[in-house]
Amino acid sequence: MTPVKYRSVDIDGFKIFYREAGAVSAPKLLLLHGFPSAGHMFRDLIPQLADRFHMVAPDLPGFGNSDMPGRGHSFERIAATIDRFTEVVGFDRYAVYVFDYGAPTGFRLAVKHPDRITAIISQNGNAYEEGLSDGWSPIQAYWRDPSEANREALRAFLKPETTIWQYTHGAPDPATVSPDGYSLDNFYMARPGVADLQLDLFGDYRTNVALYPTFQTYFRTRKPPLLAVWGKNDPFFLPPGAEAFKRDIPDAVVRFFDTGHFALETHAAEIAATIRDFLPR
């Protein structure tokens, strides 16, 4: 098996930690994680693809082992940092795997550099309003009225038991979900300053929804090869969000799995097999 290497790189004075595996001469695959996780969410996927692809999985700014930015954190800043990261590590043309927060990050990169993107794999990475469930209602209330009361109400999303629920909800058997992932996420989430940073991002997520038409125009005009692999029981991003990709990319491939938001926790082998079949096309 190809070993995974654990590295850090300086991006204009900001440390980005990342996992790397695969031969540098192989086709490139950028793995972008979501909330409240880090690159470790790909720990089961990477070994199954390392013989075929050169992969990097960075911890987004403010997550995992990457540096913590100051207040006013935004998805635009995250995307700008990851854009520079791809250039520094030599990812000039690459496929991108996006999940949750990784989706608005990766889609921004695709819009900015369409010629660099060879394919998109979206695992519960949304770009359509019909994909947003009622679980977003408290966050949408904060967008409409960014009061302190509405901000404080969102702290429930940051509780350790909520992280565990995100991992286990919708899984066919919660006993198959390892505690390793959510325990590490809760460790990172408990660090000083993280809660306010995450609340800032909840507020800024409205900018991602505002960009949905821009993302959709990119899909419609550029028609990148796109694979949607979706945990169909996701409480936040609904199956219609996956099916909507075919509206703009008729040849998009959509696969549903009987699991929840963190589909890789229960279906990494199945998702890896789907990717191995899809990307060579």
Image (cartoon, rainbow, N blue to C red):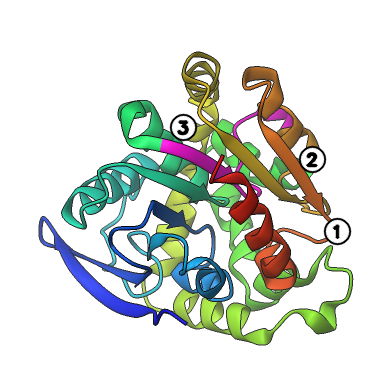
Q: Which quadrant holds residue 276?
A: bottom right
Residue, x 40% and y 66% (percent of image)?
Answer: 63
The answer to whether residue 264 is seen in the rendering is yes
Rendered location of residue 123, percent (x, y): 63, 50
Rendered location of residue 207, percent (x, y): 46, 32
The relative height of residue 32 versus residue 158 in the rendered view (above or below) is above
For marks 3 and 2 on the same chain, the one whose residue lies earlier in the sequence = 3
For marks 2 and 1 on the same chain, the one whose residue lies earlier in the sequence = 2
Residue identifier under label 3 = 207
The question of residue 122 being in magenta is answered with yes
Choose mark 3 or mark 1, whichever is in front: 1
Residue identifier under label 1 = 258
The answer to whether residue 162 is seen in the rendering is no
- Left or right: residue 73 versus residue 242 is left
For marks 3 and 1 on the same chain, the one whose residue lies earlier in the sequence = 3
Helix, strand or loop for disc 3:
helix
